[in-house]
Structure formats: C-alpha cells, structure tokens
Amino acid sequence: MSQTNKEANYTLTNFNKVRIVMVNTTEPGNIGAAARAMKNMMLSQLYLVSPSNYPSAVATARASGADDVLANATICSSLDEALNGVSLVIGASARQRNIKWRQLDVIETCNEIQSTFVANKRDVAVVFGTENSGLTNEELDLCSILMTIPGNPEYFSLNVASAIQVFAYQNFVANIDGKFDNSPKEIASFDDLNGFYKHLEQALEHIDYFDSKKPKSLLMRRLRRLFGRSVPEKEEVAILRGILNKINPYKPK
C-alpha cells in the first residue's frame, strides 16, 4: 500500500469520529440540508436531539441523495444521551454570552479536533442549537469549547445547515492537510468530566460551600468553564476525584 493510501485511510477514520449533533431542530429541511453538507465532506454521524416533524419527506428531498446519512441518524431524547462516549464536546454559537466559555473560531476548532484524535481515539461532538435561539447556557455547560464562525459584523445570520456546511468543509481541509500536534496525552472524555462535575458538586454541598452569595447553578457553570478551558487529561481528572473522595465519597443519584 502506498503512503498516500495509508494517509487517506487514516483521515477517513477521523471523519467517522466526528458527530454532528442538532438540538431541537424545528425545520426538517435543515436536517436534510445538513445531511447533504455532511456527505459532501465525508461526515456520516448525525445525531438528532428531539427533532420536530421528523422523519419527513422534506428532509429527504433536501438531502438530495444523502439518504444514507438520514437513515443512519441517531435520534436522542436528550443532549446528554447524544454525547455519551465522546472525548470532546464543541458548541456552535454566534451570540455573545455573559459567561465566557473557551472560544475558538472554526479553523482553530478543527485543529483542536485533529489534536484530540491523536491524543484520544474516541468521538468528538459538534453541537448546533435550534434555529431561533441556538444553544442555551445549560446546553453550553456540557461543552468544553464554544466554536464561532467569523462573518459580517453588520449582518451575521447563518442558517444552521449553512453553519454545519462551513464546519464540515473546514474539518475536511484540516484532515487533508494533516497538520496537528502529535500529543501523547489521553484527554478526559465527556463522561469523565461529567462524572467529575457531579462529584465536585456533591463535595461542595457536603462542606456547605453554596449560599445565597454563591448560588450553585452559577458557580458550577463557572467551574465547568474553568476545568473545560484547561482540557484536563484522564489521569488528572482521576487525581482530582481521588481528592474529592477524601472530602466526600461520590454517591450516584
């Protein structure tokens, strides 16, 4: 096998590890258009969280031959379910937020994804919100990175399917170029981090840290942002949970 073919097979594996997650999509045509964009750029993993009016003939028509992407789409009842088993969660948003998540533009995001593939062989999820309002703060709490797509500051109104097309193209380019950091670290997965956050919340409740001046919801959101920004390794999360166990052993709810 030639070196070129080896590289092509490797990048194909990377394409198969990118999940496109659409949350509460109201227009089935956008689902079809997203499937078409994905297939053009070699993406196949489509996850739909509580979509409206789906399955739909409109979605099939807009897919224009990408019926296999629609047929194999995973329907989920919650965002947590769609993110099960991934190593990195990226939320797409154009709105300014009061709390600043770690923010990267679409090119930087795709480079980060390539680094993640080297460090951790599990899937990466890119999450897109509803057409009218995008992702909620609660949904962004589950994300490590907020991805933005630069555009005209005087008129920026990308349709969700168009945003997926922009990301899918840039991800394709990043895979073809193959320029990413060859890091040996195993990054903590979404499940690792989610378990840590639940344990941390229980430990803080145990020591009566929360009060009216430090409301739990706001503080936990800031702590998620703090640890998400640092992109902790699996071993580092295990160390932190070991410390928390000395304060209060975790009790699953």
Image: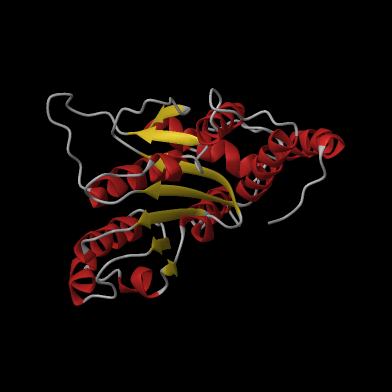
Q: Nearer the viewer, residue 150 or 93?
A: 93
User: Where is residue 228 shown, x and y percent of the image?
Assistant: 57, 32
Colour scheme in the image?
A: secondary structure
**Corner quadrant of residue 63:** bottom left
Screen quadrant of the C terminus:
bottom right
As drawn, is 123 to the left or to the right of 153?
A: right
User: Where is residue 66 shown, x and y percent of the image?
Assistant: 30, 68
Relative to 64, is 211 above or below?
Answer: above
Relative to 57, is 163 above or below?
Answer: above
Q: Nearer the viewer, residue 16 or 229?
A: 229
As drawn, is 15 to the left or to the right of 243?
A: left
Outermost residue on the right side: it is 246
Screen quadrant of the N terminus:
bottom right
**Corner quadrant of residue 97:** top left
Outermost residue on the front side: it is 212
Residue found at x 33% / y 45%: 169
User: Where is residue 30 shown, x and y percent of the image?
Assistant: 23, 59
The answer to whether residue 184 shows anywhere in this view is no
Residue found at x 82% / y 44%: 249
Instruction: Tally the numbered discs.
Output: 0
User: Where is residue 181 shown, x and y percent of the image?
Assistant: 60, 30
The answer to whether residue 115 shows anywhere in this view is yes
Residue found at x 36% / y 56%: 22
